[in-house]
Image (cartoon, grey):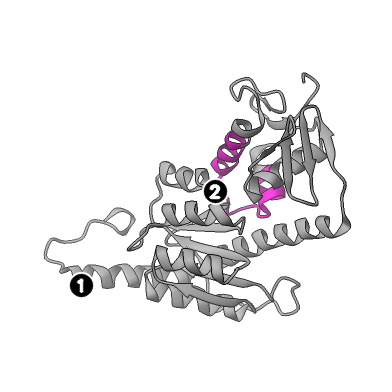
Amino acid sequence: MGCWGKAPRSFSPEALLQAVYISYKIAYNKTNLSIPSAKGDEIMDKKILIVDDEKNIVNIIAFNLKKEGYTVITASDGEEGVKKALSEDPDLILLDIMMPKMDGYEACRKIREKKHTPIIMLTARAEEIDKVLGLELGADDYVTKPFGVRELIARVKANLRKIAALQQIQKDGTQQEGFGKLTIDSERYEVKRDGNPVSLTLREFELLKFLVQQKGQIFSRETLLEKVWGYEYFGDVRTVDVTIRRLREKIEEDPGKPVYIRTKRGIGYYFDDENE
């Protein structure tokens, strides 16, 4: 039973499911199910897609998102989630992992082939490998069940604010910036190495852009989590490590000997093209 504790052998499957649901409700209630809405927030007109086969959990999430002013659409399995992600053009996707027909990992991969929409994975599995796999497939963030509603709403807002910031950069028409063999085009969300396009997720682009803007300045994982991901307390610093590794694999000639994204042992990461 994992985090739910070991159940007596006399419990029926139905009773176990009911116990799980009650545990979720307790976790949600501890963080106040009804969250005061933030009327007037500039990101409240956004559309959120929830992909999860647990109807009770979907209802709780949808209720709180709607209370915050978001438009909510839902899907009950991975296949339906991919279809709605492509047809409904949501601003953000909450994607469960364990689902019928198609799991969240495969759904994330298929969505990433067509869209750069921010994806927050919802997982009941706390193992690091499960979180890393989602990030490796292109997810921007993850939340481990059972989670508090306040935490989830904070993650949603943080990811949407990052989208809004990049859209403002695009509106302002920022010009291309060159750093050695790298070219970063903020207007097109595009990175090239030696003139060849490099495919980055939105979060990877944000992290690279942030480090480039403060070239030579060293940032701890905690600071990067706050500045790039947009939240201070909820994140796992391993998220930063995974994203850094993915970036190096894409922009460095030799990821094992990086010349752009450098590590200052015991302190953090920084951008440096002096050795190019």
Q: Nearer the viewer, mark 1 or mark 2?
A: 2
Quadrant in which the N terminus is drawn: bottom left
Residue 86 within the magenta-colored segment of the rendering: no
Can residue 25 be seen here? The reply is: yes
Q: Residue at x 61, y 59 (%)?
A: 117
State yes or no: discs 1 and 2 in contact (Cβ < 8 Å). no
How many neighbours does mark 2 have within 10 angstroms: few (below 14), some (14-19), or many (20 or more)?
A: many
Q: Residue at x 38, y 52 (%)?
A: 125
The foreground one among 57 and 20 is 57
Main secondary structure type of the part rendered in magenta: helix
Q: Look at mark 2 in the image and give the residue it sits on.
A: 138
Give the number of the disc on residue 14.
1
Q: Secondary structure at mark 2?
A: loop
Residue furthest out toward the front: 195
The foreground one among 167 and 64 is 167
Which contiguous range is marked in magenta?
A: 223-246
**Spot occupied by residue 176 in the image (x, y as percentages of width and height):** 84, 42
